[in-house]
Image: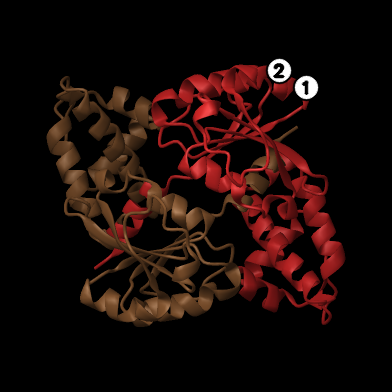
Chain colours: A brown, B red
Amino acid sequence: MAQKEDIPHKTVYRLSIYHRCLQRLKENGVETVSSEAMARAAGVKSTQLRKDLAYFGNFGTRGLGYNVDSLSGMIGETLGTTRLQPVILVGVGNLGSALLRYGGFNKEGFEIVGAFDAEPAAVRQASVRIPILSEAAMPEFIREHSVKLAILCVPASVAQQVVNTLVASGIQAILNFAPVFLDVPPEVKVNCVDVAVELENLSYFIR
Amino acid sequence: MAQKEDIPHKTVYRLSIYHRCLQRLKENGVETVSSEAMARAAGVKSTQLRKDLAYFGNFGTRGLGYNVDSLSGMIGETLGTTRLQPVILVGVGNLGSALLRYGGFNKEGFEIVGAFDAEPAAVRQASVRIPILSEAAMPEFIREHSVKLAILCVPASVAQQVVNTLVASGIQAILNFAPVFLDVPPEVKVNCVDVAVELENLSYFIR
């Protein structure tokens, strides 16, 4: 098996997609799957699928395909989602509260254990189950619950300041919805979701 | 200037990020910016910035930097966001309604002109300004308003079926929030936003 640092970032992304396909197959009672069928469901070429999985060892039996259960288990172990990963969410505006109301995270291996806002009293708590705390309570909460992962939904103007607090409190990875570049130490990983940038990118391809 | 098809997809993404930096500079009354300062704000190396812009011609004056107004205008033209681009949103659940309530799209060059749901009567319309129509009304609406761009927030189980209708009605680009691979003709462009995949990817990097 390859060392963690040798595995391309894009392969790690595709592992998540394979994982989801395998979970759907499991739910449907499928026990084995060919690399062709699985590649098609994931939207990749089957050569790509085989190359990606080869980083992690030998899977699949010629003529039989992959065992859904064991391949799914291996990918879950690799991604670190076999145990529920605690996550905090910071910034409970429109998008933040939509994510809190979304019920699908637990199924995917994540549990939002805390939500924080600069003005927690102003947030409409209707249909949001977890309490929303003040940002001042964040550092202690992160340490106490050993949280490593944060979802950031604050306005761009305060994002860097909030990130500095998160990093100083022990957060190692951030999913950033704020439309701004974040300056973090090299050991902290930031993934960005930027709806406006995605729309602009698509608009370039429209004839 | 390079042909559209010769410009790398990643360069087009970065153009959006440069565009946003320039707009912020404009709002702050800044007239010229050095490539170093702009690269830092965008989170790229200045060699990368210069290389990206070189696809579109000669910008900037040695020792003076870029004219914020004219560079921003050029990028807006290239991305096709100088005119308001009409967009429809399909699937008004938690995430869909959060996106509808988000007021920032117009500023970015996009206008959500219509929203559709399989059960429009069931959607809480509170604080959403545009009417929510039945999915049956979608094809005619798309043609009538010459819409080319759609945001997809429907459940994974119905996503492909909805996409088939969108494509048959003339949609050329889709921003997909449904956690599923979409099968589309080669001339249709799909960008995906998948929160669970982003979280899984981050969780891999946590120690």
Query: Can residue B114 be seen in the rendering of this structure?
Result: yes
Tag 2 and tag 1 share a subunit: yes
Disc 1: which residue: B144
Quarter of the image with the C terminus of chain B in it:
bottom left
Q: Residue at x 56, y 68 (%)?
A: A181
Disc 2 secondary structure class? helix
**Picture quadrant where residue A7 is located:** bottom left
Q: Nearer the viewer, residue B180 or A4?
A: B180
Q: Residue at x 54, y 43 (%)?
A: B97
Relative side of B8 to A87, left or right = right
Q: Chain of mark 2?
A: B
Q: How far separated are the C-alphas under marks 2 and 1? A: 6 Å
Q: Position of residue B149 (x, y in %)?
A: 67, 34
Q: Amino acid at mark 1?
A: Glu
Residue A70, relative to residue A30: is it above or below?
below
Q: Nearer the viewer, residue B180 or B8?
A: B180
Q: Position of residue A66 (x, y in %)?
A: 18, 29
Disc 2: which residue: B140
Q: Amino acid at mark 2?
A: Glu
Are dots 2 and 1 in contact, CB under 8 Å? Answer: yes
Q: Position of residue A93 (x, y in %)?
A: 51, 60
